[in-house]
Amino acid sequence: MSGIGVFTEPINSTRVIVNDSATVSRKLVQYRFPKSKKRRIRIKWRKRNENFRWKESYRIIKMSGSILVHSTMYEKLIQLYN
């Protein structure tokens, strides 16, 4: 499932809007670190782009009477309520 859709059935007759673009936040996260604990070396590693990755997190936005979710979060909600 991807894209935009509106569903009312699965979650206690609450209106659920599935929107992939509005509910994804991305940020850079450093995933490689030097073995050295020295501050100077860590600063050098922080300057290199190859030590970072984009991490996506999926949000659930609650509005008046409806919920805005990502498609993966929608599938998890269906599994919880079924």
Image (spheres, rainbow, N blue to C red):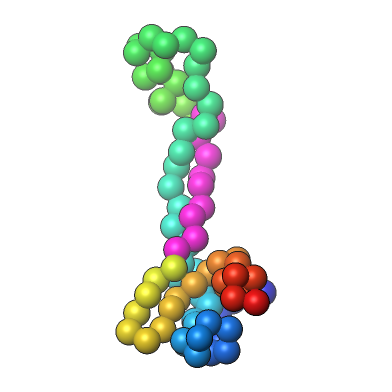
Residue 40 appears at what percent x and percent y?
A: 35, 11
Which residue is located at x 57 percent, y 89 percent?
A: 9
Magenta stretch encompasses residue 45 = no
Q: Is residue 63 visible?
A: yes
Identify whether 58 is placed above or below 62. above
Tell me where the magenta segment starts and ends, as one range. Answer: 50-59
Magenta stretch encompasses residue 55 = yes
Identify whether 52 is placed above or below 27. above
Please tell me which residue lies in front, 11 or 48: 11
Which residue is located at x 41 percent, y 25 percent?
A: 46
- Give the left or right position of residue 82, taking residue 21 as reference: right
Q: How many marks?
A: 0
Report the quarter where the N terminus lies. Answer: bottom right
Residue 38 appears at what percent x and percent y?
A: 38, 9
- Give the left or right position of residue 64, taking residue 5 as reference: left
Residue 48 appears at what percent x and percent y?
A: 46, 26
Report the quarter where the C terminus lies. Answer: bottom right
Q: Is residue 2 visible?
A: no
Identify whether 54 is placed above or below 73. above
Please tell me which residue lies in front, 55 or 7: 7
- Give the left or right position of residue 27, taking residue 53 as reference: left
Which residue is located at x 32 percent, y 84 percent?
A: 64
Residue 14 appears at what percent x and percent y?
A: 46, 86
Prevailing secondary structure class for the magenta stretch in the rendered image: strand
Identify whether 50 is placed above or below 78. above
Please tell me which residue lies in front, 27 or 67: 67
Which quarter of the picture shows residue 60? bottom left
Which residue is located at x 50 percent, y 90 percent?
A: 13
